[in-house]
Amino acid sequence: MKYFLLTGTSRGLGEALAEQLIQPEHHLICLSRTRTMNTALISAIPPIDYLEIDLNDTDQIATIMEQAFSRIDRSNVEGIYLINNAAVVSPLSRIEQGRSEQFKQNLTVNLLAPIVLTSLFIRLSESFQIEKRVLNISSSSAKNLLPGMSVYSASKAGLDVFSKCVGAEQGDGANAVKVVSVWPGMIDTALQTEARNMDKETFASADIFQMVKDRGMLASPADVATKLIKLLLGDHFIQGTVIEI
């Protein structure tokens, strides 16, 4: 049995990943603020656990991760995987127009929470002599910089550097946890909708996001989820790298 811990499963890419990870040989553990109402997930035969968590409250992550690992049956576990998918894009504005609470939420959900989750994942999985992997969902916004997205870009750049550093720490030993950061491309999700519907006076790059939508350049969450799962379970999951798909 392969065990998957996945954050942000209530919509978008996280929901698509959850749907595709439903397999007889998989045990899915969804970490989300709200339990998804998707029929496919609710009626799924393979085991699914829902653990409600608000990643803004990092103090509760340790308890949730201990609960998640308590669901793992040592007699049948073949691999354990953490997918740090949850993200927020706000504030979408010039930095002087943003509020400190928005900065805090963005950096907590996009960077601090994945750091804490990865730390606990490595610690709690240390005794498992099996395949262990962490996939951090980053963004090309770490490199392609747009006005009004400074905090989001900074958080994703930080996630990439973190992934590289932890990969260097873990190395390539037999019991190492492999950590990879991935740029999944432009996806038709609520984050894209939020960006293109912003007032142009507040978010100068809104027109760019509308153009991307109009030109049909957005991939579906389902198509991207397929690529991410292939990467996660495949031979090209190279320790400490940042991969663009």
Image (tube, rainbow, N blue to C red):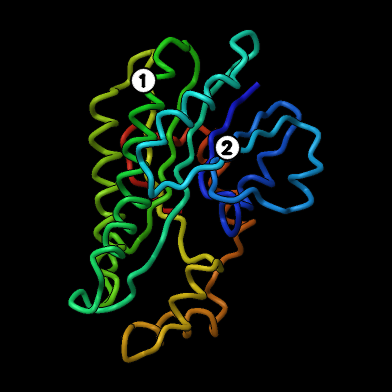
Residue beneath the point at 44% across and 18% down: 125
Give the label on residue 29, or none.
none
Q: Residues within 10 Å of mark 1 (few under 14, many from 20)?
A: few
Vertical arrangement, residue 209 with respect to residue 26, above or below: below
Residue beneath the point at 28% across and 57% down: 104
Residue beneath the point at 28% across and 55% down: 155
- Are the residues flagged by discs 2 and 1 in contact, CB closer than 8 Å? no
What secondary structure is found at the residue carrying circle 2? strand
Q: Is residue 67 left or right of residue 137?
A: right
Under mark 2, the amino acid is Leu
Q: Nearer the N terminus, badge 2 or badge 1?
A: 2
Q: Residues within 10 Å of mark 2 (few under 14, many from 20)?
A: some
Residue that carries the numbered disc 1 in the rendered image = 123
| Residue 33 spot, x, y in % from top left | 54, 49
| Residue 204 spot, x, y in % from top left | 31, 86
Residue that carries the numbered disc 2 in the rendered image = 51
Q: Is residue 94 left or right of residue 198?
A: left
Residue 230 in sight in this render: no
The residue lying toward the viewer, choosing from 113 and 145, is: 113
Under mark 1, the amino acid is Arg
Q: Is residue 221 left or right of residue 46?
A: left
* The N terminus: image quadrant: top right
Cα separation, mark 2 vs mark 1, equals: 19 Å
| Residue 203 spot, x, y in % from top left | 33, 83
**Which quarter of the picture shows residue 93?**
bottom left
